[in-house]
Amino acid sequence: MKAYVFPGQGAQFTGMGKDLYDNSEIAKVLFEKANEILGFRITDIMFEGSADELKQTKVTQPAVFLHSVIRAICLGDEFAPDMVGGHSLGEFSALVAAGALSFEDGLKLVYARALAMQKACEAAPGTMAAVIGMDDATIENICAEVTAEGNGVVVPANYNCTGQLVISGNVEAVNAACEKLKAAGAKRALVLPVGGAFHSPLMQPAQEELKKAIETTEFNTPRCPIYQNVDAKAHTDAAEIKANLIAQLTASVRWTYEVQNMIAAGANEFIECGPGKALQGMIAKIDRSVNICGIQ
């Protein structure tokens, strides 16, 4: 069974999507429609922008979404997933690819999400750190300990793959957790160059803002089950999908468990659709027995 998976923020690169634009009339039309919806020429930044321009959340999120979704649309009938999933932002790409959201609505929500997250980052500065070589339960306990000490909040944010988890929260709390994690035996606890504390309670204002936009958007039953980050389970009910999408901004991305559940449901071929190879690397660490490839 085929599982198509869609990457999140961090997969961007200068020149992304240009091949699609140059070689497919369908892609060109969709990219130009996106420029119109966003009110600026995102294609110029995607094709020729600097790394710094592409790194801005309000550019990165729609750019990665567009590359992924347009790639899937260009596959035409070849795109025949038995299930889909996406990492963080990638969940929006998965929903559009599976027909639960229209291209236009998906893009508007992604842009609203990016602006709301940017605003939340400016209001409450936070950071994230990658923890390598430590079991999930120990990381969860240390995060809870540090939070209980009262110098801010730190939580597990991304369960990426076995032995790799990202924590998120207030700068002070993340730094304190890193020290404790290293003392407890983590191979590495490395603060990441990110703009804020994504997938943590610090994103609450962004969640409130996005909630309004999601609630007024029409969702359809997807053509196949979508596995969602919040609970790592399969969903086809539009109301459930909406609720999980609203919860996603402050909740953990349970990617490790999502991939394991897809495999348990019969997935033996994973296709990463969009820029980069991050998900292929993660899936290989979760289960080496499945076939993994990517289409850009």
Image (cartoon, rainbow, N blue to C red):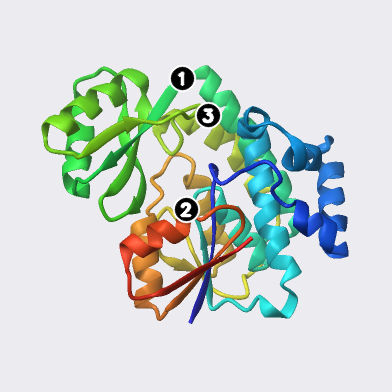
- Marks 2 and 1, the one that precedes in the sequence: 1
From the top left corner, tell me how far across and down residue 133 is, in percent.
21, 46
Q: Are marks 3 and 1 in contact (CB under 8 Å)?
A: no
- For badge 3, the amino acid type reads Pro
From the top left corner, tell me how far across and down residue 134 is, in percent.
19, 45
Q: Relative to the observer, which residue lies in front, 231 or 59?
A: 59
**Label of residue 28 in the image:** none
- Give the vertical position of 258 relative to 144 (above or below): below
Eye-nearest disc, 2 or 1: 2
Determine the CA span between mark 2 and mark 1: 26 Å
Residue ID for mark 1: 125
Name the quadrant containing residue 285.
Answer: bottom left
| Residue 219 seen from this side | no
Q: Quadrant of the C terminus?
A: bottom right
- For badge 2, the amino acid type reads Ala
Q: Secondary structure at mark 2?
A: helix
Residue ID for mark 2: 278
Q: Relative to the observer, which residue lies in front, 223 or 173?
A: 173
Residue at image point 65% right, 50% down: 65
From the top left corner, tell me how far across and down residue 116 is, in percent.
61, 31
Packing grade of label 2 (10 A; few <14, some 14-19, many >=20) is: some
